[in-house]
Amino acid sequence: MRIWIQAGALAAALTISPAWADDSSPVGLWKNIDDVSGKTEALIRITESNGMLQGQIEKLFRTPDQDQNPKCDKCTDARKDKPVLGIVMMTGLKKDGDEYNGGEILDPKDGKVYKTKITLTEAGKKLKVRAYIGVPMLGRTQTWIRQE
């Protein structure tokens, strides 16, 4: 009887576990912290499709004196003059060992697109996002914090 109870508890735990956040994957909601000002700028939802990650801006944190619905007026691609809220700003990242690379990231403030790589840290609670030109050492890194 005892083994059946343990087996039932294990089966219940296995059916519930997919609802838990997978801290071994960057998929989820992240709070973006500006590496210069230290202020929260946005919430970004990272999703995965066919082994590739992308990030979309889900919420902006703006001060009352800032435009609450800014457009990507400095973008030079199809995102030109599109609302920043909802914009897909990170694309093409693929798992490569302990990091994800080979992608691009848009900085909506200046409209520039950079190469990017990301690495999970602190048991999946933080994400190091490196944007660069040419080689990774010619760039800057932001730390994003997992929200769910």
Image (cartoon, rainbow, N blue to C red):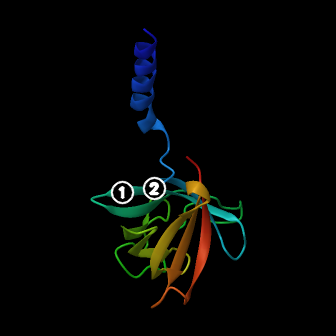
Circle 2 Cα neighbour tier, 10 Å, few/some/many (<14 / 14–19 / ≥20): some
The answer, for residue 72, to whether it is visible in the render is: no
* Up-down relation of residue 106 to residue 10 (above or below): below
Of the residues shown, which amino acid type is indicated by label 1? Glu
Q: Residue at x 60, y 63 (%)?
A: 144
Identify the element where label 1 is drawn. strand
Contact flag, marks 1 and 2 (Cβ < 8 Å):
yes
Q: Which residue is mark 1?
A: 48
Q: Which is closer to the viewer, label 1 or label 2? A: 2
Task: Provide residue 112's location: percent of width, then percent of height.
Answer: 48, 82
Task: Provide residue 120's location: percent of width, then percent of height.
Answer: 53, 63
The answer, for residue 81, to whether it is visible in the render is: yes
Mark pair 1, 2: CA separation: 10 Å
Number of numbered discs visible in the structure rendering: 2
Task: Using residue 133 as the reference point, say whether residue 93 is left or right of it.
Answer: left
Task: Using residue 48 as the reference point, say whether residue 143 is left or right of it.
Answer: right
Q: Residue at x 47, y 89 (%)?
A: 135
